[in-house]
Image (tube, rainbow, N blue to C red):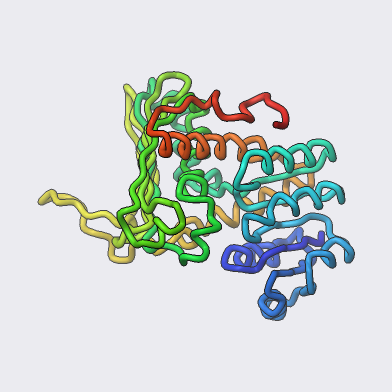
Amino acid sequence: MRIGVIGTGRLGTIHARTLSRHREVGSLILTDAEPARAQELALRLGETAAPGVDEIFKWGVDAVVITTATQAHADLIGRAARSGLPVFCEKPIALDLPGTLEAIAEVEAAGTVLQMGFQRRFDAGYSGARDAVLSGRLGRLHTVRAITSDQTPPPAEWLRASGGLYRDALIHDFDALRWVTGREVVDVYAAGSDAGPPMFREAGDVDTAAVLLTLDDGTLATATATRLNGAGYDVRMELAGERDQIVVGLDDRTPIASTEPTGPPAADKPWPGFLERFAPAYEAELAAFVEVIHGERPNPCDGREALQALRIAEACEVSRRERRPVRLAEIPGGPGAGTL
């Protein structure tokens, strides 16, 4: 199997290394907006570098992995679909609903595969939480608390193209919330603060956000995120039911300290970022992609799943801007909906 990797930044490099070691992958073709970066990585891995995206399709590949800047995702997904190629793409499909729905329509019309990179679905903690909920271990679920906290903010120039805190960071929590609970979000109430560095205000974004979400069975969930968590990278999900309570992301590297006299000590080596925290999950999702290509398992996260997470993020943006609760029914593209 020959796979084209488009984009060799931080995550693209990790994905290329993972695929280069996979027993079912014979070779890779790498390309990047900065050709020298792809060339350097190809030399290190013993793979082939292409001067541009056109060559990925001209030289012939069996599948494509997309880890470019977000604004290129939808176009590349469509191009791969028209070429009959299965695609693994980092989230999101696009930063807006029309672009997302158009790309999904191309994939569905071509009958090809689009697997989205929501890596938390492959994390042992989140998988264990899903199993606990679906098995009934917790009893009736009444409260979910999700947290995503980055240790340091991204570069200002990246921030302007990120789509904002809800679409870039909290979208992972929104996807995990749906996947772990098996429920849909029916409404949100979102707030945000831009009291941190000026670059957030200049980008029209917030550095910290909080969302109250109501699920379709009445379960209440909160999701918070910040770019300024100096203690370290902190991603958790707490789930409380009438019978039991569990937490995802609590280990000896969680950057949190107890003020109780007998509480656990602070982490010696707190997680510095998502690449370290979710390293096994990133490998697992690509292994799953290879299995999907071979027809050995169903797609674990298709474009329609990614669309629903984006719809929640869109609802949060409306809620923050208009200072009101927003029902998901107000946002186009709900389950069963076609294109706009």
- The mark tally for this picture is 0
Nearer the observer, 159 or 182: 159
**Relative to 177, does residue 2 appear above or below in the rendering?**
below
Percent across and percent down for residue 211 are 38, 37
Q: Which residue is drawn at 64% across and 40% down?
A: 301
How far across and down, in percent of the image, does residue 279 sit? 52, 59
Can you say whether 182 is above or below 84 in the image?
above
- Relative height, residue 110 to residue 11 (above, below): above
Q: Which residue is drawn at 47% across and 36% down?
A: 318
Side (left or right) of 255 relative to 146: left
Question: Is 336 positioned to the left or the right of 322 in the image?
Answer: right
Name the image quarter holding the N terminus.
bottom right
Q: Nearer the viewer, residue 292 or 232?
A: 232
Front in this rendered view, residue 253 or 13: 13
**In the image, is 123 to the left or to the right of 34?**
left
In depth, the one of 285 and 158 nearer the eye is: 158
